[in-house]
Image: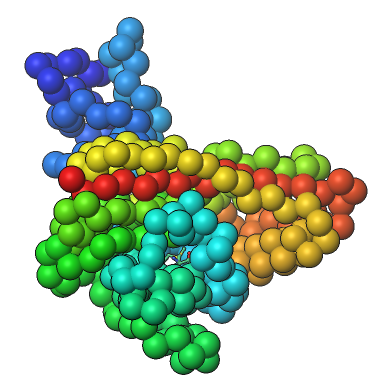
């Protein structure tokens, strides 16, 4: 039972798997998906105004975990990304002699492209919490002979850079993995000079459409949503990105969208084969089993589902990317 008391919601929630668990709670009013700052869990329950009850699971937070991890099947898929596609929405605004921060840069292929883009006098710093991918990023820069780029193992939440020291900040497919995306944007804003821009692109997995219909691929999406949420992230980040920018206090928001489409043979093979492997070997698979979201046998079926999808008549998949450029006033 719940009742609204002033601006708070008070009551008793009953949830749990197998064994029912009861908890007395008192919450500030939250929108679905918002994090409760006091208790640290996301609002994934529905509040029924008529019946005064909370329905659905309350997901307890665990410390933030990066859903994909850094298995070779993941990092190799990220390493094909190029700024010409991943940063197309902001490239015209990035010029020499800008100093740019790429936060959550992963294996750094986009970062190195950005550095080349701002030659001769611009420079780029790529940061990531994983030493493995930072090593790979450094090797890519050396291999391509790009020297106006540096990489460091740092946290997005606390980069350690001086305030007002960058002209632009950029992140690709990162905020969706954070339990505190607004805090990351606030840190990006701190290190930007007044008038500096922050450009972020996030997928919204909830926009995924595929053909032919296959319960194994529907199951994949369900597993992915649930593991991402349990890890503290948000598989529907795209639709919330503008909202996060507003909360972080950026001005002059420019919001665009683009799509990823897999339909020709090369695209079907690349997408289907990587997920057939990732769903068995990456951290997504480990966590799905650990959290009791899927069994190894179910992951095996999903993997085979991706391989069958590649061969299916009329196979197709698409989803939307949301891109926001905001300015520090
Ligand atoms: C999906 S990958 C994207 C990599 C790259 N931006 C790209 O699009 O290819 C997300 C990256 O964010 C990094 N990351 C996640 N949480 C982080 C944090 N709190 N601080 C720094 N990096 C983080 C991960 O290690 C991972 O390399």
The extreme right residue here reads: 313
Question: x, y percentage for residue 12?
Answer: 23, 26
Which residue is painted at 61% across and 46% down in the image? 259
Of residues 281 and 122, the one nearer the viewer is 122
> In terms of image quadrants, where is residue 39?
top left
Of residues 198 and 108, the one nearer the viewer is 198
> Where 86 falls versus 258 (above or below)?
below
Question: x, y percentage for residue 127?
Answer: 32, 73
Instruction: Please say whether residue 255 is visible from this viewpoint.
Output: yes
Which residue is painted at 31% across and 71% down in the image? 97
Q: Quadrant of ligand 1?
A: bottom left
- Image quadrant holding the N terminus, namely top left
Which residue is painted at 29% across and 43% down in the image? 245
> Where 147 falls versus 250 (above or below)?
below
> In terms of image quadrants, where is residue 311?
bottom right
The extreme left residue here reads: 6
Of residues 39 and 139, the one nearer the viewer is 139
Which residue is painted at 57% across and 45% down in the image? 258
Instruction: Please say whether residue 281 is visible from this viewpoint.
Output: no
> Where 151 falls versus 3 (above or below)?
below
Question: x, y percentage for residue 279?
Answer: 61, 63
Question: x, y percentage for residue 206?
Answer: 55, 39
Left/right placement of residue 227 relative to residue 122 reads right
> In terms of image quadrants, where is residue 30?
top left
- Image quadrant holding the C terminus, namely top left
């Amino acid at each position: 039972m719940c009742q609204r008391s002033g601006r708070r919601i008070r009551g008793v929630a009953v949830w749990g798997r197998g064994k029912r668990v009861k908890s007395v709670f008192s919450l500030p009013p939250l929108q679905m998906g918002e994090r409760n700052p006091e208790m640290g869990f996301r609002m994934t329950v529905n509040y029924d105004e008529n019946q005064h009850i909370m329905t659905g699971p309350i997901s307890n937070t665990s410390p933030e975990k990066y859903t994909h991890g850094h298995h070779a099947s993941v990092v190799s898929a990220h390493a094909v990304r190029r700024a010409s596609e991943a940063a197309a929405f902001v490239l015209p605004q990035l010029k020499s002699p800008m100093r740019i921060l790429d936060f959550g840069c992963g294996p750094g292929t986009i970062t190195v492209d950005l550095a080349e883009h701002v030659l001769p006098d611009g420079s780029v710093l790529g940061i990531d919490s994983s030493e493995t991918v930072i090593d790979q990023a450094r090797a890519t820069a050396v291999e391509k002979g790009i020297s106006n780029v540096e990489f460091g193992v740092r946290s997005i939440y606390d980069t350690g850079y001086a305030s007002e020291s960058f002209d632009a900040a950029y992140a690709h497919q990162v905020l969706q993995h954070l339990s505190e995306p607004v805090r990351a944007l606030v840190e990006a804003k701190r290190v930007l000079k007044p008038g500096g821009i922050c450009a972020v692109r996030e997928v919204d997995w909830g926009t995924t459409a595929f053909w032919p219909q296959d319960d194994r691929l529907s199951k994949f999406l369900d597993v992915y949503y649930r593991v991402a949420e349990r890890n503290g992230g948000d598989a529907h980040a795209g639709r919330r990105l503008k909202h996060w920018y507003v909360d972080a206090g950026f001005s002059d928001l420019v919001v665009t969208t683009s799509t990823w489409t897999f339909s020709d043979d090369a695209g079907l093979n690349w997408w289907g084969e990587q997920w057939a492997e990732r769903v068995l070997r990456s951290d997504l698979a480990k966590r799905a089993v650990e959290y009791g979201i899927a069994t190894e046998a179910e992951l095996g079926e999903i993997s085979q589902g991706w391989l069958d999808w590649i061969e299916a008549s009329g196979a197709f998949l698409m989803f939307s990317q949301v891109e926001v450029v905001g300015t520090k006033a």
